[in-house]
Image (cartoon, rainbow, N blue to C red):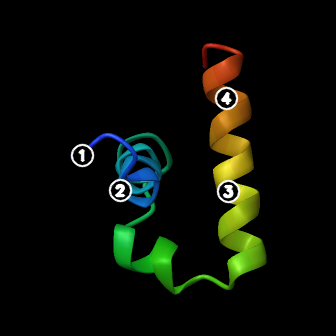
Amino acid sequence: MEEGDGDALYAHYALHHLGILPSTLMALPLQERGFIYASIDRALAQGV
């Protein structure tokens, strides 16, 4: 993954920590995907 490839990094986290396939993540409406991204950011900030 290239630095700055945010979608791929979020997809990697979602797959390995949340069990969400990348294709499922990318098919979500933008607001839902944004919520998941924000949730991932929060989990990482808290060291979860």
Going from N to C along the chain, the mark reached first, 3 or 4, is 3
Q: Is mark 4 on a helix, strand or loop?
A: helix
CA–CA distance between discs 1 and 4?
22 Å
Going from N to C along the chain, the mark reached first, 2 or 3, is 2
CA–CA distance between discs 2 and 3?
13 Å
Q: How many labels does the image show?
A: 4
CA–CA distance between discs 3 and 4?
10 Å
Residue carrying label 2: 8
Looking at the rendered structure, the kind of residue marked 1 is: Glu
Residue carrying label 4: 43
Q: Viewer-nearest of labels 2 and 3?
A: 2
Report x, y in % for residue 23.
37, 78
Residue carrying label 3: 36
Q: Residue at x 50, y 48 (%)?
A: 18
Q: In this view, does 41 lie to the left or right of 16?
A: right
Write down the quadrant of residue 42 in the picture. Answer: top right
Q: What element carries label 1?
A: loop
Q: Is mark 2 on a helix, strand or loop?
A: helix
Looking at the rendered structure, the kind of residue marked 2 is: Ala
Report x, y in % for residue 14.
46, 51
Q: Label 2 near label 1: C-beta < 8 Å?
A: yes
Viewer-side residue, 31 vs 18: 31
Q: Which mark is residue 2?
A: 1
Going from N to C along the chain, the mark reached first, 1 or 4, is 1
Going from N to C along the chain, the mark reached first, 3 or 1, is 1
Q: Label 4 near label 3: C-beta < 8 Å?
A: no
Going from N to C along the chain, the mark reached first, 1 or 2, is 1
